[in-house]
Amino acid sequence: MTDVNRRSEIVFLYDLKDGNPNGDPLDENKPRIDEETGINLVTDVRLKRTIRDYLNKFRNEEIFVREISDEKGDIQDAKLRARDFLTTKEPLDAFETGKKNIDENILNKCIDVRLFGCTVPLELKVQNKKEKEKEKEKEKEKTGSITHTGPVQFKIGRSMHKVFMKHFRGTGAFASKEGASQKTFREEDFLPYSLISFYGIINENAAKDTKLSEEDVDLLLDGMWNGTKNLISRSKVGQVPRLLLKVNYKEGNYHIGDLNNLFTLKSDLIDEEIRDISQVKIDVQRLVEILAKNKDKIENIQLCLDGSLVFIYGGEETDFEKCLNEAGIGTEQLSM
């Protein structure tokens, strides 16, 4: 395993047609939209869930944050989940002994904790030393927690344009109750189109605490790209990853910041009329210029592109990778 010893920034673009990228459970599961700007919002929690589920299901990676039910159908709480990683069989003589054992096992086994950190509440039975010699050894419940700041952090995703929300109402297949002649009604809200931009950062300092490796980061990128593509639920079918950009720095404790804001969407249509990736272009002039100014601090750029995305530089259509190379920045193609 190779330790993460450099800072990186990530920009991830994906789009969705006729779907709901992130419903709000407090608002009838409608797509999240900033009322002031008309921008579609997607929480970082949604993206992390996509990554977790993909790595667990398709890459056989253990994840800590997942739903586990017992034989009665009861779902584990975080304290019970933590006890899954308590491997010592001897009665605990100190709370810190159990905490250390759980912490080491979680970090060694759970890629999502190494990536995103965790706050894990603990409740452990600890043997009372004063009562140890008595026939009935007494145990007491002691509480505490494990906390790790995640080296990988994402901002809330935002659409690169204003969106338009449509409301549908239809009939269900079943009656509302026994003996009724009327079928139930169903209602849903969706977006005809949204091109969403996520910004993330990998902090090399926090990576030491969670034992994050470069191999873990490769799986993170795989989860972002292929997890988005393979998220085939009714509201998410049709999500397509379009661009994944990772800027790796060679100067410690340094990054440019907010690279996502240096991509500019261009279209001949007003925002709410956009319905397809073919109706937009991405202007990368500001991005390339800023990266070129900082090229002495950049080790390289990793890039994965969908062929449908069109880029422009200086008002003309261009090859994005060629633009970066001409600016003196080395690029490496990510294979997904």
Image (spheres, rainbow, N blue to C red):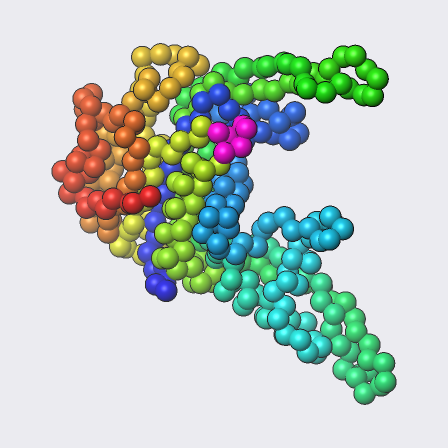
Bounds of the magenta segment: 232-237
Predominant secondary structure, magenta span: loop
Q: Position of residue 46 (x, y in %)?
A: 53, 38
Q: Which quadrant of the rendered structure holds the N terminus?
A: bottom left
Residue 99 seen in the current view:
no
Nearer to the camera, 88 or 97: 88
Q: Is residue 236 magenta?
A: yes
In the rendered image, the vertical position of residue 13 relative to residue 106, given as above or below = above
Q: Position of residue 322 (x, y in %)?
A: 17, 36
Residue at (68, 19) in percent of width and height: 173
Q: Position of residue 24 (x, y in %)?
A: 60, 29
Nearer to the camera, 183 or 316: 183
- Would you identify the image quadrant in which residue 35 lies? top right
In the rendered image, the residue lying farthest to the right is 135
Residue at (59, 70) in percent of width and height: 100
In the rendered image, the vertical position of residue 172 relative to residue 233, given as above or below = above
Q: Which quadrant of the rendered structure holds the C terminus?
A: top left
Q: Is residue 244 magenta?
A: no
Q: Position of residue 179 (x, y in %)?
A: 84, 17
